[in-house]
Amino acid sequence: MKRLILDGPGALHWEDGPEPVLDGPGQALVRPIAVATCDLDPAVLQGRFPLQGPYPFGHEGVGEVVAVGADVRTVVPGDRVVVPFQISCGDCPACLRGRTGNCTSHPFMSTYGLGAMGGLEWGGLWADLVRIPHADAMLVPVPAGVDPVAVASASDNIPDAYRAVAPQLADNPGAEVLILGGPAASSIGLYAAGLAVALGASRTVYLDTDPDRLKLAAQLGAEALEGPSDTRAGRFPIVVEAAGGRKALVAAINATANDGWCTSVSVQAQDVSLPLLGMYSRCCTFHTGRAHVRPVIPEVLALVAAGRFDPTPVTTRTVPWSDSLDALLDAPLKLIAVR
Ligand SMILES: [Zn+2]
Ligand SMILES: [Zn+2]
């Protein structure tokens, strides 16, 4: 079986890897048909994020089920399914609470395609075949009428954006949303803008310095505001920090209104001191952390199926499977390889 291996910054190669096999009754084998880059992938390829290669690459995508174990009830061969990037069993205490990214049935941070951090044994989605250890708990069928290519990022980056605006808008319907966009979590910031609009925010402001991302944010229905992350745009009850770095993080917190929610979806690799007195005074709820994607993937797909949210403007490049390697080295904002 062919699979793509990331060796390190600027270096990828195809190799013949071991063929995954079913070795338990709850498992499935899936053939990826549309695989997307996560915001971390170009960062690793450009040496901006420290993930040590070599490792099987790819952790966002839709696949076709090709085989299922005897106990699998929710999918059959031929189904098209979103594969969550995190491995989750569905019935440990963490999974039962919806904290599927912290499933306790497997080593901490078990994921596809993120190197030693996620465990090398799960493989990557940029491959001919992938083994799903808990098919019923993990796989989410793509709804009828939804193009699998459109939702290839529903494994990770779209639900990551969703968790930063959906519970907050459910708690505060119609609230105004501010997104600090930037290179660290570029697609997540844009998806958050589109999802805030879809979920009824009365105003969605997307702040960034990059003209291409600003154009995409406007296309997604947001108010595109050009400027650095500490541009004063007022205080907002819901703020999403996707830009990365201390300046943006502090700016996001400072832009959070009384009793507001600030979610940092960028991965801050350095320790940052926070303006805690202001956060305390304004009763700021701050959250950062890996998204628990599996429970919200059906909600994201339902929005797409209903025509309320279209993630496709964020896909800046789509290529045939065989062109994956060269296209990845160009590091587009969101690449999807299709076969
Ligand atoms: Zn990711
Ligand atoms: Zn679990």
Image (cartoon, rainbow, N blue to C red):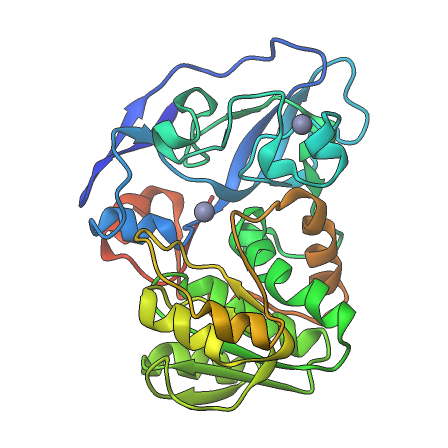
* Quarter holding ligand 2: top right
Residue 46, how many percent across, how many down? 21, 52
Q: Can residue 145 be seen here?
A: no
Note whether 129 is above or below 50 in the view shown: above
221 or 65: nearer the viewer? 221
Quadrant of residue 322 in the image? top left
182 or 172: nearer the viewer? 172
Taking the spot 19% from the left edge, 44% from the top edge, the residue there is 9
Note whether 247 is above or below 148 in the view shown: below
237 or 326: nearer the viewer? 237
Note whether 33 is above or below 135 in the view shown: below
Taking the spot 59% from the left edge, 34% from the top edge, the residue there is 102
Relative to 205, is 323 on the left or the right? left
Taking the spot 57% from the left edge, 70% from the top edge, the residue there is 280
Residue 30, how many percent across, how many down? 58, 29
Relative to 79, is 189 on the left or the right? left
